[in-house]
Amino acid sequence: MRIVAVTACPTGVAHTYMAAERLEKAARRLGHLIKVETQGSMGIENELTVEEIERADVVIFAAEVAVRNRERFEGRRIVEVGIQAAIKDPDRILAGLGG
């Protein structure tokens, strides 16, 4: 499965990057392709391209704040979860995606 994700927390520091790392590790361990964009205090990092978004089977928003430039994801299957869920139990999130 091809997955793209966006992580963002209110302060945009530790939790944003922790969630990204946990999702990446879990996805790779389960055999999925993933790219995670972080929206933190440093701005948008590892920004997803139009092609990456279009090729994705699913989009995960692990965020406690509004995802910036959300319109890029219109028409895509989006799964929204809290940032803590992505940190504490990324396997459960990925298992719920099917495929």
Image: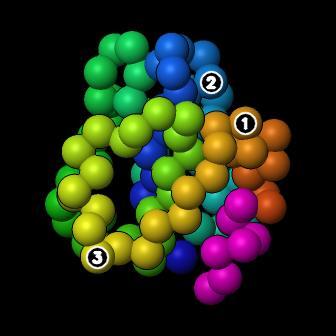
**Residue 95, relative to residue 25: is it above or below?**
below
Q: Are marks 2 and 1 in contact (CB under 8 Å)?
A: yes
Residue at position x 40%, y 38% from top?
66
Q: CA distance from mark 3 to mark 1?
A: 26 Å
Task: Name which of mark 2 and mark 1 comes first in the sequence.
Answer: 2
**Callout 1 crowding tier (Cα within 10 Å): few <14, some 14–19, many ≥20:** some
What residue would you read off at disc 1? 84
Q: Amino acid at mark 2?
A: His
**Residue 78, relative to residue 62: is it above or below?**
below
Q: Amino acid at mark 3?
A: Gly
Residue at position x 71%, y 61% from top?
93
Give me the disc on residue 9: none
Q: Are marks 2 and 3 in contact (CB under 8 Å)?
A: no
What residue would you read off at disc 3? 75
**Foreground: disc 2 or disc 3:** 3
The x and y percentages for residue 30 are 72, 66
The C terminus is located in which quarter?
bottom right
Segment tinted magenta in the rendering: 93-99
- Determine which quarter of the picture holds residue 32: bottom right
Q: Residue furthest left?
A: 50
What residue would you read off at disc 2? 15
Q: Amino acid at mark 1?
A: Gln
The x and y percentages for residue 35 are 43, 51
Residue at position x 38%, y 30% from top?
39
